[in-house]
Amino acid sequence: MLSHRRRCALALALALVASGLACDESGGGGGTVDATTGGGGTGEGVEGESDGAPAASSDAGDATGGSEFLEACEPGPTPTLEIGGGTARFEPWVNDEAVLVYGHQGGYHIDVSLLATRLTREGAIDGVLRGYIDGALRAETSYGGELTCLLSGEGLESAGNLLIWEAEPAELHMRLARIEAELTDAAGTTVSASAEVVIIDPFAS
């Protein structure tokens, strides 16, 4: 028979072995939790990418401007038209003032750009601009070209149109003018708008 001391030593050894097995099993369980946490880490990585670089689907949305972009640049039941200034692109008039431009051929004009929505952008447009002072027609210009869909999603623009006045600068400076615009797209849809601006002659003394 085993002595008391040997039995105690054997019991202690068995207890240590059992404790070691328990630790291994616990460690394995911890690894499973870590794997799950690792999955969470992957999720955090996606969030990090979302903060720094949008996901592919977000990029596609930005490229098209989303549904609002498509609605503004595609034909629809309620087209709109807005009159503004600008030579390269549509710009709202600052303080409702339009600068008189001295043309190279001796005429005088103001730059007019148009911002439209829900029209057909394919094909040529047909339009006319008119300018009135004190109710009298003093300027009329036809324009054409094509509509350009803005990347901002605001709509379709026709930029850099010249409204040429049949008047001298002295007759136009600081006068309130009513500007009317009419635009017909390639599908035959017509929209119109009007605006009032004060004409400023930059060379007036």
Image (spheres, rainbow, N blue to C red):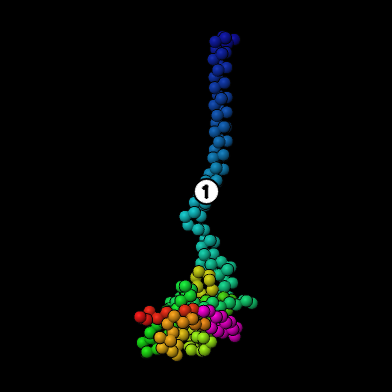
**Between residues 111 and 58, which one lies in front from this camera angle?**
111
Q: Assess whether residue 187 is covered by the magenta stretch.
A: yes
> Residue 46, how many percent across, how many down?
52, 52
For label 1, the crowd category at 10 Å Cα-Cα, with few meaning under 14, some 14 to 19 and many 20 or more, is few
Q: Assess whether residue 4 is covered by the magenta stretch.
A: no
Q: Residue at x 57, y 32 (%)?
A: 25
- Classify residue 106 by image quadrant: bottom left
Q: Residue at x 36, y 87 (%)?
A: 104
Q: Which residue is mark 1?
A: 44
* In-image side of 169 versus 144 (left or right): left
Is 66 located above or below residue 5 in the figure? below
> Residue 16, how many percent across, how many down?
54, 22
* In-image side of 67 versus 93 (left or right): right
Question: What secondary structure is the magenta-colored segment mainly?
Answer: strand
Residue 202 can be seen, yes or no: yes
Q: Which residues are magenta?
A: 180-196
> Residue 178, how many percent across, how many down?
52, 82
